[in-house]
Amino acid sequence: MENKISVKIEKSNRKTISIQVLDTATVQVKAPLRCSNKNIWEFISSKTSWINKQIAQINKKQHFANNFDFEKYTYLLGGIYTKQDLSYVEAAKKYLPKIAEKLAAQLGYWYKELKLKHSKRIWGSFSSKKQLVLNINCVFLPLNLIEYVIVHELCHSKEMNHSPKFWKLVGIHLPDYKKRKEQLKNYAFVLNLKLQ
Ligand SMILES: [Zn+2]
């Protein structure tokens, strides 16, 4: 391992050993009570390349997020503007429903109602009551990723789970969805923004 990494070891009444990279400097290992320290360290060293990969991924995301300067710029629908006195929430209410309506009409989908909500966890959802929910923070994303989120949720109106059938359907509408899905991961930090 290149950097100094602290390892938190937690022993408890569990059956298996698990490992999680909490951040670029911390790894957490959960182990059964009977597991010896030697075994734990062997387990950790067997996971070295996996740990490094996880850390590289966290660094990549962090680097991506650091490219944004919120003091100086306003980011809207993937565009960068010099600091403007605009409300992201108002912009989201204005643009997101239009984009969703257009896509649904184009692709032949229907929803009863569109709701904009903030969640730190998910970009959108589609309920059995035919309600399309979009994370209000989507307004921050580039248009191709907003489209991906909306198409993904619309496809849930036909396939409620993430089965191969579901992904096939997404692929029919967006042949490059895998690329978009990957790009969206870079924007995970956006979920934590409190837009005003
Ligand atoms: Zn989904």
Image: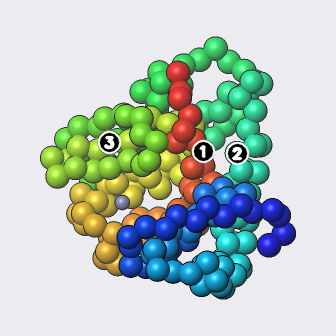
Which disc is residue 65 wearing? 2
Instruction: Give amino acid for label 2.
Output: Ala
Is residue 193 visible from the viewing direction of this image?
A: yes
Q: Earlier in the sequence, mark 1 or mark 2?
A: 2
**Distance between the alpha carbons at the discs numbered 1 and 2:** 7 Å
Q: Earlier in the sequence, mark 2 or mark 3?
A: 2
> Colour scheme in the image?
rainbow
Q: Secondary structure at mark 2?
A: helix
Dot in front, 1 or 3: 1
* Mark 1 and mark 2 residues within 8 Å of each other at the beta carbon: yes
Locate residue 177, reporting x and y percent: 50, 66
Among the 4 quarters of the image, the one containing residue 54: bottom right
- Give the residue at x 66% y 64%: 7
- Measured as percent of width and height from the top left, residue 56 is found at 73, 65
* 169 over 108 or under it: above or below: below
Who's the residue at 71% across and 50% down the image?
A: 62
Which amino acid lies under the numbered mark 1 shown in the image of this protein?
A: Phe
Q: Residue at x 64, y 14 (%)?
A: 85
Gap between marks 1 and 3 measured at Cα: 19 Å
The kind of secondary structure element at disc 3 is strand
Residue 115 picture location, percent across and down: 31, 35
Sequence-first tag of 1 and 3: 3
Residue 155 place in picture, x, y as percent: 31, 61
Q: Residues within 10 Å of mark 1 (few under 14, many from 20)?
A: some
Would you name the residue on which mark 3 appears? 133
